C-alpha cells in the first residue's frame, strides 16, 4: 500500500470520527433541552401551586384576623374605589368542586394578583352589591382555582364569605336579560364583566346582583375565555351558615 493511500484512509477515518462526535454532541444537547423543557412545564403546572398555596395561607390568616378584630368594615359596605389592590376581600366556596374547595379572592387581576389566587376585577361590584362581582382565575397554573370551571352546571351554587355575611349566588340564565349562564367568548369581550354583562354600554345602570367568573379556554391555551354567570339568591348573616354549605348544593 502506498503512503498516499494510507494517508487518505487516515484522513477519512478522522473525518468520520468528527462527524460522529458532532452528532453525539447535538444529541446530548437535544436531550438536555428536552429535560429542561419538561422541568419547566412541570414547574408551571405544579410548582407554581406551592407559591400560591403559601400566598393563600397568608391571605386567609390576614383576612380572618381582620374579621375577628372588630374594627374592619364588611367589604360589602365599601365603595369599589376603597379597596386596596393585592388584599384579600372575600373567601370563595364552590360546593360543586368539593367540600374542601375554598380560595381567598384577591383584589386585582394583574399578573402578580392572579399568582396569589382568583382576582376580582377592580371597579366591578363587591360581594352582595348591585352590579357584577367579576372574578378571573387561572385554569392550569398557580393552584389553578378555575381548573374545573367547565364542570359547573346551571343551578350550582357559589358562596362568598365576608366579615358578616354569606352571599349565595346560583348559576343560571339571568332572568329578564339575554345573559346566559355559560359563554365562551374572545379574550377581547370585556363586556362580560360590565355591571350589566353582554351590553354594549359599560355605563348602563345595573339593577341585579350578579357574579361572573372568567378563565382561559381551552385548557393550556388563552385563545378564548370561559365565562360563568350567576345571580344572588340569598344573604345569610353570620353566625348562621348558608343552606348551600349545609345541604345538597347542586340544585
Image: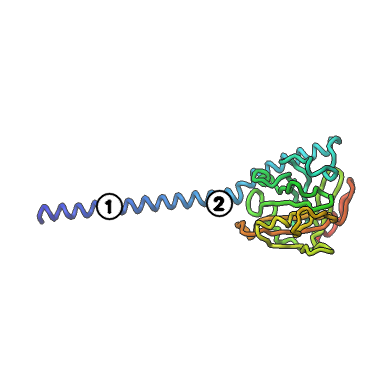
Residue 217 image-quadrant placement? bottom right
Residue at position x 78%, y 53% in the image: 203
Where residue 59 sits in the image (x, y, percent)? 73, 41
Rendered residue at 47%/52% (across/down): 34
The residue at the far left in this view is: 2
Q: Dividing the image into 4 quarters, which one contains the C terminus?
A: bottom right
Badge number at residue 80:
none
Q: In this rendering, does residue 96 appear at all? A: no
What x and y, as percent, mark residue 24?
36, 52
Whether pointer 1 and pointer 2 mark residues with C-beta atoms closer than 8 Å, the reply is no
- Residue at image position (45%, 49%) is 32
Picture coordinates of residue 41, whole percent (x, y): 55, 51
User: Which of 74/92 is in front?
Assistant: 74
Residue at left offset 24%, top offset 51%: 14
Q: 167 or 29, which is in the foreground?
A: 167
Dot 1 alpha-carbon crowd within 10 angstroms: few under 14, some 14 to 19, many 20 or more: few
Q: Earlier in the sequence, mark 1 or mark 2?
A: 1
Which residue is under mark 1?
17
Q: Position of residue 159 (x, y in %)?
A: 81, 52
Viewer-nearest of labels 1 and 2?
A: 2
Can residue 77 be seen in the rendering of this structure? yes
In the image, is residue 107 above or below residue 220? above
Q: Could you tell me how far apart the alpha carbons at marks 1 and 2 are, in whole angstroms?
A: 36 Å
Q: In screen coordinates, is 106 left or right of 221?
A: right
Q: Which mark is residue 41?
A: 2
Q: Where, quadrant-wise, is the N terminus in this rendering?
A: bottom left
Please tell me how crowded label 2 is: few (under 14), some (14-19), or many (20+) other residues with Cα within 10 Å: few
Colour scheme of the picture: rainbow
Amino acid at each position: 500500500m502506498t503512503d498516499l493511500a494510507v494517508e487518505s484512509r487516515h484522513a477519512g477515518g478522522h473525518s468520520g470520527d468528527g462527524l460522529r462526535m458532532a452528532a453525539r454532541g447535538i444529541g446530548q444537547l437535544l436531550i438536555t433541552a428536552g429535560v429542561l423543557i419538561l422541568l419547566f412545564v412541570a414547574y408551571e403546572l405544579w410548582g407554581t401551586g406551592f407559591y400560591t398555596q403559601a400566598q393563600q395561607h397568608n391571605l386567609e390568616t390576614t383576612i380572618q384576623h381582620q374579621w375577628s378584630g372588630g374594627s374592619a368594615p364588611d367589604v360589602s359596605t365599601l365603595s369599589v374605589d376603597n379597596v386596596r389592590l393585592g388584599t384579600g376581600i372575600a373567601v370563595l366556596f364552590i360546593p360543586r368542586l368539593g367540600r374542601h374547595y375554598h380560595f381567598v379572592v384577591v383584589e386585582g387581576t394583574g399578573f402578580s394578583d392572579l399568582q396569589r389566587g382568583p382576582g376580582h376585577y377592580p371597579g366591578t361590584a363587591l360581594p352582595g352589591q348591585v352590579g357584577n362581582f367579576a372574578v378571573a382565575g387561572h385554569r392550569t397554573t398557580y393552584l389553578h382555582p378555575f381548573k374545573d370551571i367547565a364542570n359547573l352546571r346551571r343551578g350550582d351554587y357559589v358562596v362568598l364569605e365576608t366579615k358578616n355575611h354569606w352571599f349565595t349566588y346560583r348559576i343560571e340564565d339571568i332572568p329578564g336579560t339575554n345573559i346566559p349562564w355559560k359563554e365562551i367568548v374572545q379574550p377581547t369581550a370585556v363586556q362580560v364583566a360590565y355591571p350589566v354583562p353582554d351590553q354594549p354600554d359599560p355605563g348602563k345602570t345595573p339593577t341585579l346582583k350578579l357574579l361572573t367568573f372568567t378563565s382561559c379556554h381551552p385548557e393550556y391555551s388563552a385563545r378564548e375565555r370561559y365565562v360563568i354567570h350567576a345571580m344572588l339568591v340569598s344573604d345569610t348573616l353570620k353566625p348562621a351558615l348558608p343552606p348551600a354549605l349545609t345541604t345538597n348544593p347542586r340544585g
